[in-house]
Image (spheres, rainbow, N blue to C red):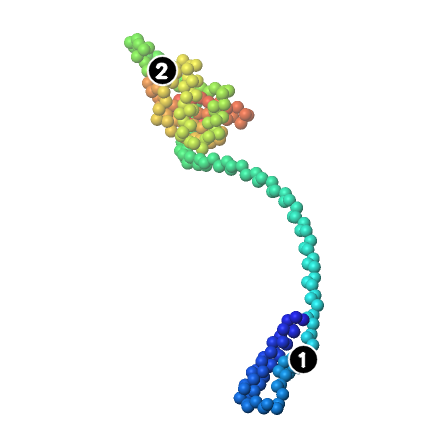
């Protein structure tokens, strides 16, 4: 309200002061009339001020301040529940690599066995019809037994109880690679005979199946000259395995 009155007074003064100055100027310029009374300037100014104040409209009061509404606090946040940690992963075990595949050796094809010659029976002797006088045969000179080179003959076999023959028959696909093992078995067997085999060389496979393995070669004997020989390992079909040797002059079995 005080600010409004100051403004009204300032407006009145801006009107009254110019009027007062104008009146004073006119009074100074005009010749004074001795008979006229002096104007009451103070009363005129006061009257004008009162009139101006009365013309000023009543100030409208400022509206009552409406306070801001009280802020509603946000509700207290509920913390997230503590997370359960994931279990530690168990690493997969290290894979064991497969063993390197070892290919089977290429089997050596056994040679086609030579068939045994057809047995030719001895002719039936005819009864003698004429008595022939036996001629005298001159006595031969005595022969030194040490000078006679008799090749060992015959066939020998032995029941295998060591499992070596079974191992040879199971690996019959190796072909000639088994011949040296078969020859070793035959050399062991020959030590039980009168004449032993010292060595078998030039070995080659003739038969190589799951039931029989035969190899031919040349045997060096403890007595006599070297001769051809056949060493073998066989399964008899009754669950037994045999090994042995025979002279090659007896042919192939």
Left or right of 177 on screen, residue 56:
right
List the residue tagged with mark 1.
Answer: 50
What's the residue at 62%, 75% (across, down)? 7
Q: Which of the two residues, 42 or 125, is positioned nearer the viewer here?
A: 42
Q: Which of the two residues, 231 or 164, is positioned nearer the viewer here?
A: 164
Disc tally is: 2
The answer to whether any part of residue 166 appears in the image is yes
Marks 1 and 2 sit apart, C-alpha to C-alpha, by 172 Å
Q: Which of the two residues, 184 or 190, is positioned nearer the viewer here?
A: 184
Task: Name the image quarter holding the N terminus.
Answer: bottom right
Q: Quadrant of residue 182?
A: top left
Residue farthest to the front, as pictured: 34
List the residue tagged with mark 2.
Answer: 222
Above or below, 104 relative to 43? above
Left or right of 114 on screen, residue 55:
right
Q: Secondary structure at mark 2?
A: loop
């Amino acid at each position: 309200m005080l600010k409004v009155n100051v403004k009204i007074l300032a407006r009145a003064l801006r009107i009254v002061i110019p009027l007062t100055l104008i009146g004073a100027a006119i009074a100074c310029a005009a010749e004074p009339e001795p008979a006229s009374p002096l104007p009451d300037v103070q009363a005129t100014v006061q009257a004008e001020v009162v009139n101006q104040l009365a013309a000023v409209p009543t100030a409208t009061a400022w509206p009552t301040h409406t306070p801001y509404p009280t802020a509603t606090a946000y509700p207290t946040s509920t913390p997230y529940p503590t997370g359960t940690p994931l279990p530690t992963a168990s690493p997969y075990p290290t894979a064991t690599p497969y063993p390197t595949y070892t290919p089977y050796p290429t089997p050596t094809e056994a040679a086609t066995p030579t068939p045994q010659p057809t047995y030719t029976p001895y002719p039936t002797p005819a009864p003698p019809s004429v008595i022939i006088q036996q001629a005298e045969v001159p006595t031969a000179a005595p022969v030194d037994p040490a000078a006679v080179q008799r090749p060992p003959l015959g066939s020998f076999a032995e029941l295998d109880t060591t499992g070596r023959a079974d191992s040879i028959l199971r690996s019959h696909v190796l072909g000639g690679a088994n011949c040296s093992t078969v020859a070793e078995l035959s050399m062991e067997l020959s030590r039980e005979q009168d004449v032993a085999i010292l060595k078998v060389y030039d070995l080659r496979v003739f038969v190589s199946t799951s039931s029989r393995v035969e190899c031919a070669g040349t045997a060096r004997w403890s007595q006599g000259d070297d001769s051809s020989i056949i060493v073998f390992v066989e399964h008899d079909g009754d669950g037994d395995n045999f090994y042995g040797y025979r002279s090659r002059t007896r042919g192939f079995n």
